[in-house]
Image (cartoon, helix red, strand yellow):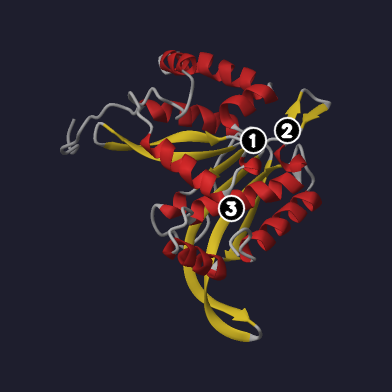
Amino acid sequence: MKNIGEYQIEEFPMSRISTIDIGVAGLKKHHIKALIELDVTEPRNLIREKKKLKEKINFNSWLIKCISHAVEEFKQIQGIRKGKRKLIIFDDIDISIVIEREIDGKKVPLPYVIRKTNEKSISDISNEIKNGQKQSIEGEEDYVLGQEKKNRIFMKIYYYLPGFIRNLIWKCIMRSPMLIKQNMGTVMITSVGMVGKINGWVIPVSIHPLCFAIGSIFKKPGIVNDKIEVREYLYITVLVDHDVIDGAPAVRALSKLTKLVEGGYGLS
């Protein structure tokens, strides 16, 4: 063929197959989207001070704890439908995050579920994330960090199944709140803005009843005590499953989260 020029052929990453399947399933969810920005100037100052005192916390682990605490007060927001007439609301808050690992010289994002975040401290969450980053992996077949061996074997088989069979598997999973929580948790947090600067919001696709896409932190003018000051603002996109919660209680939950974050919950 003419006018093609030079090109390279690379192996399609196995991890992308599950991402594609999740995208297909996620587009069937009825999420409402909220684009919010939070003033994180004071919390970041407090975290810097704690780091000087050698306390083992970071911004991400603190934000996960804030989200967990807000969800704990409004648990219906992480509810999952079972059939047409039942809603399963779990007491434990299991949050799925993405940890980037290097495999064969390439960076691959792998899910990791932090269990019972409502019972863990900020430092506990921070330590667990660090341990997940150090976890040994055999290859991209380690679909979820921290999985049992039998689940890893299933995932190796899953990657080689035809697309229509994989979609049938996802349909079965989506009908079972227990399977969803066991394998993926009830809340998803993706920190895409922490990788590079994005001046705006990221709109994700998710199968979770509640999903947060954490954007970048930017400095811009803000009003404090009727005076204009340079403040640090965090962009966050929130997806809420409209099938399980109405707009008003969802807004109350996000309002609670705003107070926790901007008030530096757990840092003072």
Residue 77, quarter of the rendered image = top right
Mark positioned earlier in the residue sequence (2 or 3): 2
In this view, the residue in front, 190 or 8, is 190
Element type where label 2 sits in the image: loop
- In the rendered structure, find residue 47 and report the number of the disc placed on it: none
- In the rendered structure, find residue 90 and report the number of the disc placed on it: 2
The N terminus: image quadrant: top left
Residue 140, quarter of the rendered image = top left
Element type where label 3 sits in the image: strand
Q: Residue furthest bottom?
A: 227
Query: Gap between marks 1 and 2, in whole Å?
Result: 8 Å
In the rendered image, which residue does mark 1 sit on? Answer: 186
Q: Please tell me how crowded label 1 is: few (under 14), some (14-19), or many (20+) other residues with Cα within 10 Å.
A: many
Asked whether the residues under the numbered discs 1 and 2 touch, taking CB atoms below 8 Å apart as contact, a structural biologist would say yes
In this view, the residue in front, 139 or 147, is 147
In the rendered image, which residue does mark 3 sit on? Answer: 237
Find residue 178 and report its horizontal and vertical position in percent: 67, 23
Mark positioned earlier in the residue sequence (1 or 2): 2
Of badges 1 and 2, nearer the viewer stands 2
Residue type at tag 2: Phe
Of badges 3 and 1, nearer the viewer stands 1
Asked whether the residues under the numbered discs 3 and 1 touch, taking CB atoms below 8 Å apart as contact, a structural biologist would say no
Q: Please tell me how crowded label 2 is: few (under 14), some (14-19), or many (20+) other residues with Cα within 10 Å.
A: some
Mark positioned earlier in the residue sequence (3 or 1): 1
Q: Does 164 sit left or right of 132 as displayed?
A: right
Asked whether the residues under the numbered discs 2 and 3 touch, taking CB atoms below 8 Å apart as contact, a structural biologist would say no
Find residue 22 and report its horizontal and vertical position in percent: 53, 30
